[in-house]
């Protein structure tokens, strides 16, 4: 048997009114959240395409600390999303291109996190390791640090 509160109780009436208002607010917030997520998907996809075109045409990432001074160019995120929409392996390779020093898995994972790659530390570390093991052109020092190998036929 279901117990129904008296509707003529002003406390219950007030709570029911508040519940109705809160449900309406939640429905509106959910709609806004869906719109924002859709907008994020569009903007992040466009960003990734333009980032890849710029990187390809420059020959290096515009976020790389090794990149030459770019005049008055202002990239306000400072690279917070520079690995967005990349596979883990591609992001790890891009992170290796940012430095001249071999990187440990922990250093690579930290660099990826500063560039917008998320996930648990343990899973991301395993994923980066597995991805780098499958990538060609990646070397590993005796200390277990990763680096980019230069092909033997490079003219310099």
Image: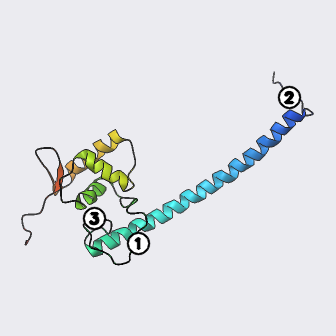
Kindly identify which numbered label has been placed on residue 151: none
Residue 98 in the image: state x and y as whole percent.
25, 61
Q: What residue is shown at x 29% (from left), y 72% (from top)?
A: 56
Count neighbours of disc 2 (C-alpha within 10 A) and say few if under 14, some if 14 to 19, many if 20 or more: few
Q: Earlier in the sequence, mark 2 or mark 1?
A: 2
Mark 1 — residue?
A: 74
Residue 105, above or below 152: above
Q: Are marks 1 and 3 in contact (CB under 8 Å)?
A: no
Sequence-wise first label, 3 or 2: 2
Query: In the rendered picture of this protein, how many numbered marks are placed on residues?
Result: 3
Disc 3 vs disc 2: Cβ atoms closer than 8 Å? no
Q: Is residue 70 above or below residue 3?
A: below
Residue designated by label 3 = 65
* Position of residue 136 in the picture relative to residue 120 (left or right): left
User: Is 12 left, or right, of 85 in this rendering?
Assistant: right
Q: Residue at x 30, y 56 (%)?
A: 91
SS for callout 1: loop
């Amino acid at each position: 048997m279901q117990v129904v509160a008296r509707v003529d109780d002003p406390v219950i009436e007030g709570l029911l009114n508040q519940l109705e208002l809160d449900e309406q607010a939640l429905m509106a917030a959910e709609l806004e959240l869906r719109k924002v997520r859709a907008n994020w998907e569009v903007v992040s996809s466009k960003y990734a395409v333009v980032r890849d075109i710029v990187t390809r045409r420059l020959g290096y990432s515009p976020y790389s600390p090794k990149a030459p001074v770019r005049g008055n160019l202002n990239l306000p995120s400072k690279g917070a999303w520079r690995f967005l929409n990349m596979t883990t392996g591609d992001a790890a390779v891009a992170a290796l291109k940012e430095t001249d020093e071999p990187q440990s898995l922990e250093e690579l994972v930290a660099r990826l996190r500063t560039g917008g790659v998320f996930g648990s530390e343990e899973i991301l570390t395993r994923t980066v390791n597995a991805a780098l093991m499958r990538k060609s052109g990646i070397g590993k020092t005796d200390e277990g640090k990763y680096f980019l190998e230069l092909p033997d036929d490079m003219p310099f």
